Amino acid sequence: MKWILVPLLWTAAVVVALAVIWRMWHGRNVVLRGRWSPRFVRMVVLVLIVVGVGIDKASSEPPPEAGRRGVPRVRHVALASSGVLTSQAVTRWRHGNARLGPWQTVKQAIVTLDATAASPDSQTIETIRVGTSLLPEQFRELLLADVNAIEKGQPIPTVDAAKLIATLDEMERFGFCDHWSVAYLWRKSARLTSPGDRTRLAELFVRIERHARMTDALIYAQVAVRPTPISPRAWMSKAGPSREIRLHEEQIQQRILAAAQGDFSTHQATTWQRDATMVAAVGDGSVPVTIVRPDGRHELRPGQTFTFTRLDLLETSPGEKPVVLRHLWLGQIELLAGRTLSVWDLPALISPEAKKKLQSVVEKAVAGDELAAEQLQRALPLTHEAIRIAVEETPRAKGAPRLRMLLTLFDDTVVRDRPPQSPVTRGDFLLPGMER
Amino acid sequence: MGILHRLFNRRAQEVWRAQTRLLHRLGYVFPPQAVQWISTSACDLRCPHCYSCAGPKSDRELTTDEAKRLIVDELVELDRPTLVIAGGEPLLRADFAEIVQHAHGRDVPWALHTHGGHVERLLDVFRNFPPVMVAVSLDGPREYHDTFRGRRGCFDQALTAIRALKGIGCKEVVAGTTVTRQNADLLADMVPTVLSCGADSWGLHLMTAEGRAAENTAMLATSSQLRRAAAFARRMRSVMHVELDDEWGSAGADDCYYRDEPFLCGAGRSTCVVSADGHLMPCTTTDPSQSQGSIRDCRLGELWADGFAAFRGGGKQPQADALDCWLQTRHGRSCRRCAFDEPDSAGEPALVRVSEGGAR
């Protein structure tokens, strides 16, 4: 048989080769229709890509990568070892973040309340009360206390650091990973004024950063896995999802979990690292200062330039000599010895001359000067307080909308509440273990 | 969910680009996923950012019969991609209901871009022949929107349209905002309106220098505004469904924080546009040199199969770069860098100008 088979195979190969050549040079293009031909082609392409021959490196530049330029690097232990993300947590996260789910509705109601500064109507309050019923208990308490205060026209209640950390703990155990929520907790940290709270600020900020990266990792993993949505068929609703659907769901949780755990240790640039940062330097004659970042403590020596983010703390050592920071246009900023300072404290430390300069830039920005607004944006950790006051006083000024946009970058959402000015200049905050 | 599904999703962008090129070499092409039809150049507004220079009705517009035969029936042959009816203002076409009814009858899914002013009048059409998506333009707060659109009451009409469409159970209603230099910093102020209007999602477009917008390039958003708007969108996605649309280009690995699907420019690869006078274009450009032919002279399916070679092959020309918006890059403008890259210590990245040949 071989003497027949071999020539036949050769003939077939030649015919196919000729057909391919003819198609490439003379044939008219054909639209691939139907169900199977596109799938088959995709399989072929996948094989080519996997073996590395299908990628056209010349066709475009590589896409922007997270954490490429100018932002402090952070390296953390992998989430897998932290034990926070479990399959159950992923399930809850997926359900909690469902579009138009009750939690989304609550967030929308609160953001609307915040943005409009209007007195909430009874329907909004009810929406929030009902929608929060499935939230982790401590987080729910915080939200409802705020809503009650808004309803009664009272100031937003303050919360201590221990409560904020406990709330985060509970949220993560519950699988409740959410950017809006963690930014809400961070804004609460503006009111942490007691020495006891100050000592836990670094811990809180580390947790907030971890939570934000965990949320980003979940979002990334969800897209990487991209589960096919399968919902129970109507006639099966009484018996619950079928075994097939349950298995499918379980597989998805596992895949998202695996992808999130893999991504968590490498993904760098959350909005906390990207936005509302400023560049400053330690003054030449200054004593060193320690910057406390989510990845640890780093000593900054005189002349060293650094980027300060909203989750960084500056720790000055005890002694007579103050730390002097140098900012490009706001000049020297003196940090008193023996303090732990956050982004909430910095505006109060600007010198009187610099405050005048800042005020003049704010006035220009309020009047609509684009360059002045950009100048403010590049120093948000120092300028946010002045912007807030200006926007509150002249909400309808030409430049006010732009300044409100700047504040959304700093606050991580649209809010109206103005955190109280930090009492840091009164010298209340000492480092742990220090005596007055 | 098989191995193909998993592998494909992990490397969707590479697979998609490679298969487009490979198929192109072998003389094959996938059917389009969406075909946008500029159904009319007539519009009762004169917005300065209009990409189609809409205003008076053109003499060369497709007739009712042509629209049904040359577009809808052809789409059936192309595995029924979504027919996106745009304009001008498509609801000013007297035969709108008839065309939509024909599409519905032939199982061609349809979507609509409108300023919203005539939706209430035609609500029965939307009820009887439900679209898969309707995008209603919303440019800013009331005062800004009405001034920009040149007519008092437009803002209220847009909101009424969104509510009415949701009221009759329209599957997806999008509030569409074209970000310009004038409204980029009004986005935060728009939040209460967008949240309360009932829209399912908020689409943020970018103005491109096409049509009337080409005469108003001073209205293009600055690099600083683009970055702010993108950062704003990323935050708002935690609260509602916000999407950065195609004109922004790809955010690379960070795409998932700005949109639901990874970006790939579909011009000539998975989408195309039929202009008001029946020419097949890669995207919403008014440049006649980009026409692949008229559907009056050649069938839509054949034009699709044989056209758009520059988009489907590899190379360094702007058309081949599927990670950026061709409509922007053809005007020497690329927005993805300033919108998504991290700023360096010196401040904001400058708006990237695209030199000849696509190099940045």
Image (cartoon, coloured by chain):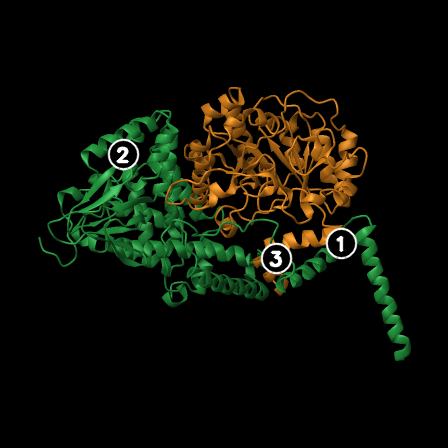
The quadrant holding residue B304 is: top right
Find the distance from the CA under tag 3 to the CA under tag 2. Answer: 60 Å
> In the rendered image of this protein, which colour is used for chain A?
green
Mark 3 lies on residue:
A235
Residue occupying image coordinates x 91% and y 76%: A4
Disc 3 sits on a residue from what chain? A
Is A247 displayed left or right of A209 in the figure?
right
Find the distance from the CA under tag 1 to the CA under tag 2. Answer: 63 Å
- State the SS at label 3: helix
Disc 2 sits on a residue from what chain? A
- State the SS at label 2: helix
The answer to whether mark 1 and mark 2 are in CB contact below 8 A is no
Considering only vertical position in the picture, is A17 above or below B185?
below
- State the SS at label 1: helix
Query: What percent of the width, then of the height, locates residue B110?
Result: 67, 39
First in sequence: mark 3 or mark 2?
3
Comparing labels 3 and 1, the label whose residue is closer to the camera = 1
Is A388 displayed left or right of A252 in the figure?
left
From the image, which quarter does the N terminus of chain B lie in?
A: bottom right
Numbered mark located on residue A386 in the image: 2
Considering only vertical position in the picture, is A95 above or below A408?
below
- In depth, the one of A389 and B286 nearer the eye is B286
Disc 1 sits on a residue from what chain? B
Crowdedness near tag 3: few (<14), some (14–19) or many (≥20) residues, C-alpha within 10 Å? few
Query: What percent of the width, then of the height, locates residue A288?
Result: 20, 52
Crowdedness near tag 2: few (<14), some (14–19) or many (≥20) residues, C-alpha within 10 Å? many
> In the rendered image of this protein, which colour is used for chain B?
orange
Q: Are the residues under badges 3 and 1 in a single subunit?
A: no
Mark 1 lies on residue:
B26
